[in-house]
Image: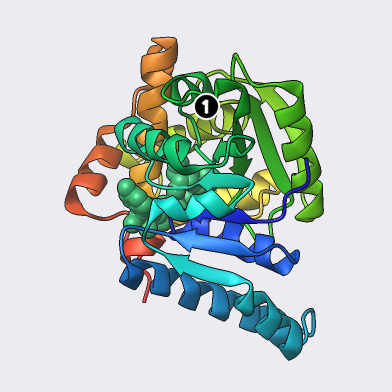
Amino acid sequence: MEIRAIMVIGAGQMGSGIAQVAAQSGIPTILHDVNMDVVQRGLQGIRKSLGKFVEKGKLSPEEMEATLARLTPSDDLAAVAECDIAIEAVVENMDVKAKIFRELDRHAPAGAILASNTSSLPITEIAAVTKRPEQVIGMHFMNPVPLMKLVEIIRGLATSDETYETVEALSRRLGKTPADCRDVPGFISNRVLQVMINEAIWCLYEGVASAESIDTIMKLGMNHPMGPLTLADLIGLDTVLAILEVLQDGYGDPKYRPCPLLRQYVKAGWLGRKSGRGFYRYA
Ligand code: NAI
């Protein structure tokens, strides 16, 4: 199936990034959030990100304007009626996602695919709230979307081969490398990654080392591009906690128990980069 128009639901850090790469690839894209102020903030973020590509000479000013012109803001989910695929990137919460998928299912054309960028929630459960489970799939982008090459594709129990092939082809069209995985809690990426991040938070909580020291050891010692606490701040500590809770519930294994320090930071509203403070402070 050819994708001629995309709707992205959620204009936060991931949704904005997904909408940006879709528009940069020449596909008309609707960017949706709870209200127009939030969508405009997302669009400003996209403008800033594209501006950096222009500064580096990787994009011409004309291409930047053409990309922005392909983006349409929306606060009405019914706009999905004009799209071949919806990619949901709202908060990591099953109730919120289920409500959105029910609504998308009601308004989307019969052939349209409904994808979720969830980090860890079961695609099969999201699909079950719709009348088209064979057209529901996980399309998990990495942060920051314009720079990161991977899309982890997750097939739910009922996902059809056609849906999978369409999403795989779309991922390549967006300049990404797809890799597939079965529908298990946390998939591959977060099942492996979040154990490391949680362990780093436990080390900080137990006073084993400072945040800077933990990150330096893991960054230089393991040749990671950034330390686990810096990465947690980038992901968002609310999202990290939500994923660990899904892993703990899903596998029932105490190794996924979220560190109390993480819970405390989230309760304090210290969500990382996006709120200005997490394990580090951001101007
Ligand atoms: P974020 O907090 O930056 O953005 C979430 C957006 O969802 C907000 O703009 C919020 O207004 C919007 N939203 C909430 N309820 C909504 C509703 N009912 N209708 C429309 N919009 C609604 O979060 P972020 O980081 O963009 O994460 C979004 C999703 O992407 C989550 O499922 C997360 O697990 C996943 N993800 C996050 C990654 C990360 O590094 N942060 C990486 C890969 C996936």
Quadrant, the N terminus: top right
Quadrant, the C terminus: bottom left
In the displayed structure, does residue 127 sit left or right of residue 271?
Answer: right
Task: Give the residue at x 56% y 37%.
Answer: 114
Q: Which residue is at the far top?
A: 252
Q: Residues within 10 Å of mark 1 (few under 14, many from 20)?
A: many
Task: Give the residue at x 45% y 28%.
Answer: 121
> Would residue 16 be seen by someone viewing this image from the given angle?
no
Work out whether 60 lies above or below 50.
below
Residue closer to the observer: 196 or 127: 127
Question: Residue 256, percent across and down?
Answer: 41, 22
Mark 1: secondary structure: loop
On the image, which quarter does residue 54 sit in? bottom right
> Would residue 89 be seen by someone viewing this image from the given angle?
yes
Question: Residue 270, percent across and down?
Answer: 27, 55
Question: Residue 90, percent across and down?
Answer: 41, 47
In the displayed structure, does residue 55 sit left or right of residue 112?
Answer: right
- Residue placed under numbered mark 1 in the picture: 186
Work out whether 174 lies above or below 256.
below
Number of numbered callouts drawn: 1
Q: Amino acid at mark 1?
A: Gly
Task: Give the residue at x 51% y 19%.
Answer: 124
On the image, which quarter does residue 145 sit in? bottom right
In the displayed structure, does residue 148 sit left or right of residue 107?
Answer: right
